[in-house]
Image (tube, rainbow, N blue to C red):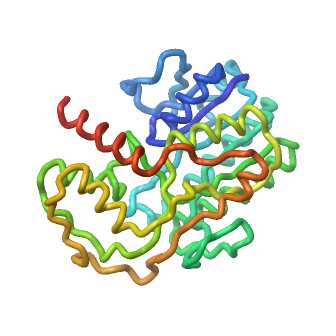
Amino acid sequence: MKVFVTGATGGVGSFVVQELLQKKFEVAALVRNRNKLLPAGVNAIYGDLTEISSIENSFAEFHPDIVVHLGWIGVDQKEKENVTQILNLQAAADLLRLSQKYQVKTFIGLGSESEYGVHNKKIDETAATKPLTKYAVTKLATGLLCEKMCRDENINFVWLRLFSSYGPGDRPGSLMSLLIKTLLKNEPMKLSQCIQTWDYVHARDIGRLITLIASQPKESGFYNLGGGQAQMIKNIILKIANEIDPQAKLLFGEIPYGPNQNMHLEADISKLKRVYGWEPQVSLDDGIKETIDWHRAQVSK
């Protein structure tokens, strides 16, 4: 089977592509930067999310069975209130028009826990959606639009509301990436009190899940995606510091919480377990060590 992937070079996307290739899928990836290296065997389709119509000929020639839409414009915290978030809704609509036109069978999109807003408890898919940022509103709207467009053309649809991901190659602005890079430079790290609970899932487990869905699509709908190992962020930070430098200067409480701080962010993944039989396999301890080793290797390059 053939899979077209957006966001293929990101922290999650790179693992998705690896898993798809291992399972013998034929993979094409939307690539904006011609200097970006892709794994051997991946077909590069050069273009941009804001100009999906320009790739129609290449898309038609590849003729995918499955579309995995991971790409998103404006994922850093400073960009989440930017009105240009709306570009993502248009990009998804344009991509689905191509998918409809060329008879794609399955569409898998990556949503966000932020679609739910603040609940401060373990969240299942029946929780009310109360997005608080333009990013979150756009994620919610994009998922709903994609569901409608897929239903209209009888395309299998899965929208994965991702809680917190991590792993080698994660975006530079994530908490874990910033912390590791700061401690490797022997610099102090300013932090909040870090007593909130977060739910991390390794990008390799996300890749396994998306490959499983691509292989055997089952029940269309929205799914919460987390690691099943939710714990206080302070504990995770101390694990990282212990691996790098137990004497690291961790300045807890230096950064105040924002007005809408979510103190308990945990995914109920029972629906994924029931429908797809998927559970995370990478332990947090092993994942942290792997991620630190990757960052160390980047420093030495």
Residue sitting farthest toward the bottom: 259
Residue at position x 74%, y 70% in the image: 126
Q: Position of residue 152 (x, y in %)?
A: 87, 49
Residue at position x 72%, y 51% in the image: 273
Residue at position x 82%, y 41% in the image: 155
Q: Position of residue 73 (x, y in %)?
A: 48, 50
Say which of 89 and 236 sits in front: 236
Quadrant of the drawing holding the C terminus: top left
Q: Position of residue 209 (x, y in %)?
A: 64, 41
The answer to whether 219 is drawn above or below residue 18 in the figure is below
Q: Does residue 262 appear left or right of residue 93 in this picture? A: left
Q: Position of residue 82 (x, y in %)?
A: 44, 64
Rendering quarter of residue 211: top right
Q: Does residue 221 appear left or right of residue 61 in this picture? A: right
The answer to whether 288 is drawn above or below residue 61 in the figure is below
Number of disc labels: 0
Q: Does residue 33 appear left or right of residue 24 in this picture? A: left
Residue at position x 64%, y 40% in the image: 210
Quadrant of the drawing holding the N terminus: top right
Q: Does residue 131 appear left or right of residue 262 in this picture? A: right
